[in-house]
Amino acid sequence: MSEPAPPPPDDEVDIGALVQSVWQRKWVVAAFGFGFAILAMAIAYWLTPRYTATSVVMLDRSQSNIIDVEAVTSGLGQDYYTILAQRQVLLSRALAERVVDAMDLQNDPYFNPMLVEEEDPSLVASILFGGIELLKTTVRGAVTEETEGPTLRDTLGADYWGRKLAVDTLLRSLEVQSVSDTYVYSLSVTTESPIQATDIANRMAELYITDQLETKFEATQAATEWLSDRVAQLRVEVEEAEAAVEAYNSSSTLISEATLANTNRQLKELRERRDEIVRQQTVGDREPELRAMLEQGDYAGFAEVVNLPRLSSLAQNIETAEGDERAALVQTFEVLASRLVDQAGIERERAESQRANISASIDELERQLASQTEDVVELRQLEREAEATRRIYEQFLRRLNETSVQEGTQQADARVLSEAVVPLIPSFPQKTLIVLIAGFLGGVVGIAYVMVIEQMNSAFRSSEELEKATALPVMGQIPVAPVRLRKGLLDYAVERPSSALVEAIRNLRTGVMLANIDRRPELIMLTSTLPKEGKTTCSLLLAQNAAGLGKKVLLIECDLRRRTFRTYFPGAPKVGMMSILSGDKTWDEVVYHDERTGLDVIMGEETKVNAADVFHSQRFQDFLAEARRRYDFVVIDTPPVMAVPDSRVIAPMVDAVIYCVRWNSTHKDMVRAGIAQFTQIGIGISGLALTQINLKKMARYGYGGYNYYYYKSYNRYYLN
């Protein structure tokens, strides 16, 4: 089953009631609006008119320089943020000061209020400026505890303050706007004189362009001076670097790189020759071993080592010969072997001498190569440094020449697109707009006044208020059901047993059960003052909650005029309670068992007989008695008490009466009148249920308390 939809706005009915109340007091609202409009009109005609003149300046991004020296004197950048920065330049105090000085605005009373103080001896001006000075003196004395001595105004002088006030007034009168986020700016100046506003707007645009040219000229001049100094330094550095290369060349005995490569090649060949001599295995290398074998008479081993066929043959004959023959063979073998050993010794000495000579040559070449390599590396480093310094010098020299040519050829980054014209209509005050806004605000104030009056103590917003007004206990505080359609109510209750709504019904059920400890109520009736107060919702949920405890529960629809149960139980039979009372149908044929909730339901049925007469009948009393016998609990949904008398007729037959009051909606007097209907016939109401509570609004009104935060933890879906 899909999740229930979010609840509809809780203030729909409230808004309708408020709109009706406002409409009933429409003349009060109209009086507020008319009064505000008249007051605004009087103020608008009393105010001094002011005129706004506007000149238009465009930032010119398409200008071209005579030479490409943009990195030095390009002026404005091409990025968006640099363009936006020009608005702050137009609003800068420096530009405003130039305009004030150029047009002598510090001697204009509009821009320098100090002149009014000096020139206007009127009583009003004297009192006004005297009061201001007295207030300043009092505050200054209270803060600094100084009452004597020169003030800051006296120290800086009247000229300084007059110029400062003129600049401040001009900045307040100036408005700079980008036209649709383009490179076009409008400069609007507002004064009491249309001609003066026009002159100031045009002069400000002119001085802004002049300021750009002067700034560029100063930047170019400063760049030329800096580049000149830098070029002179770099020229000295180039000369010093080249002199260092020449000095090193003259002081070092360097060879060419080709000779250095030849030395490297010779060194490699000597190393390879030495390695080859070492790798060659000769008989002379084993001279000591051969002499020892010969002395020991190991002729076979000697022959095997030298690997000579003749000696190998003699060694084999010696092993097989005897006597004189063996002696002769031994003598021959020893003579040949001695010669071979002596020759091996000579070869060994010769090889060692060669290795020593080659190693010495290798060492000498390595020393020479290392020394010459260091000299070459040092020379290359000096040459690279000299070359780098020379390139930097040439680059700066080129930039210096370009900058020198650029002097006197600067162009402004902006141009006047449209000069200001003298305005004929004042821009302030806009009398029509002021009157309309004032009338609208007056209407809003009137509506607010009516709403406050209507909402003041007109409905119950807390259980404490309800209990105090009725002297009856509030058994439950039921939040508004968070479903869009009625048929989703029971699904929501079944699927969300821990929600705020179900928890509140559980509290209501507990309150009903504890209302009479000696006798547990079995027949429970719910009613209300007016329709749409949530009594049907409470009836359905109370029955469903009781059925959830494993009890046999019957829900009876006794509101025979509206008959809304079929919306909640679409599968119920068409016949209902009237069929049982008339004897046309049996209980089993009429009672509908809802598998979702586990409760039984008897639907309301249309009848031509007056409903109150039906409930007065003996058959209805027998019907309730049979319901009491068959079920543990019977919940009866009855019509509102102020609409029809049905609930007052049924009330004497039940064990408990629950009176539903809609939160922040039903008028207190209506609730009291409805409860009085039961009091007059001697029926005591068991308790009240404050229904359809908006928990957020309840907390905002200051009545939420514990319930709001308790329910919040149970039903975040509803609150969010």
Image (cartoon, rainbow, N blue to C red):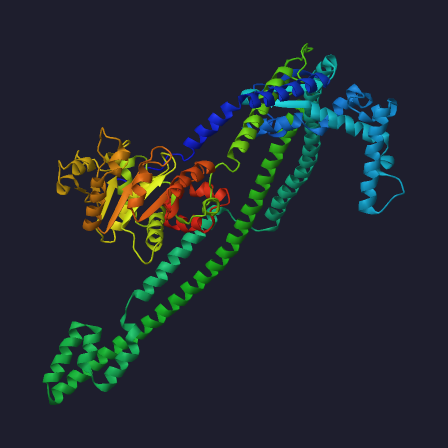
Q: How many marks?
A: 0
Residue 631 shows in this picture: yes
Quarter of the image with the C terminus in it: top left
Quarter of the image with the N terminus in it: top left
Q: Nearer the viewer, residue 395 or 48?
A: 48
Residue 411 shows in this picture: no
x and y, in percent, of residue 82 in the image:
58, 29
Quadrant in the picture for residue 400: top right
Residue at point 89% right, 40% down?
A: 150
Residue at point 23% right, 30% down?
A: 609
Against 43, residue 237 (above or below) is below
x and y, in percent, of residue 245 in the image:
60, 45
Query: Left or right: 680 with respect to 611?
Result: right
Q: Nearer the viewer, residue 598 or 434?
A: 598
Against 556, residue 279 (above or below) is below
Against 356, residue 121 (above or below) is above
